[in-house]
Image: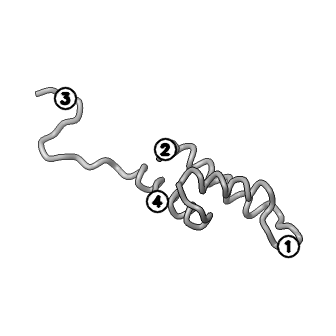
Amino acid sequence: MLMPHPAVLRKLLEEYEAAAVSEPVDASGEPGPRTRDLAYTLCVSTGTRDVRQALETARRRLADASAPAPVRDGAHAGVAD
């Protein structure tokens, strides 16, 4: 599965959260079209089928992407001995 760049995923997440708060729901209580479109895109981007799972997965991936890479003992990345 292709994984979106963290910056793209972060922007999607921010846009979804803003739309979910600011866009009015329709008469049946469903989210507005922008929120639905962003929910769909988040699901596709995270390989999920439910927006709640997509949000969890996106947040987890962003947290993993911002965590520092582990350093191996005695290994110096990109430095020749």
Kind of residue at disc 3: Val
Q: How many labels does the image show?
A: 4
Kindly give the residue lying farthest to the top in the view shown: 80
Which residue is located at x 60 percent, y 56 percent?
Answer: 43
| Closer to the eye: label 2 or 4 | 2
Location of mark 1 (residue): 28
Name the mark on residue 79.
Answer: 3
Given contact means CB atoms under 8 Å apart, are the residues at marks 4 and 1 in contact?
no
Mark found first going from the N terminus, 3 or 4? 4
Mark 4 neighbour density, 10 Å: few (under 14) some (14–19) many (20 or more):
few
The percent coordinates of residue 15 (x first, y second) are 68, 52
Mark 2 and mark 3: span between their CA atoms?
31 Å
Residue 54 figure quarter: bottom right
Label 1: element kind: loop
Residue sitting nearer the eye, 43 or 60 = 43
Residue sitting nearer the eye, 34 or 66 = 34
Which residue is located at x 47 percent, y 47 percent?
Answer: 1
Is 54 drawn above or below residue 74 in the view shown?
below
Mark found first going from the N terminus, 1 or 3? 1
Kind of residue at disc 2: Leu
Label 3: element kind: loop
Q: Determine whether, in the image, residue 73 is placed left or right of residue 61.
A: left
Kind of residue at disc 4: Arg
Location of mark 2 (residue): 2
Label 4: element kind: helix
Location of mark 4 (residue): 60
Mark found first going from the N terminus, 2 or 3? 2
Residue 31 figure quarter: bottom right
The percent coordinates of residue 40 (x first, y second) are 66, 55
Is 63 drawn above or below residue 31 in the view shown?
above
| Closer to the eye: label 3 or 4 | 4
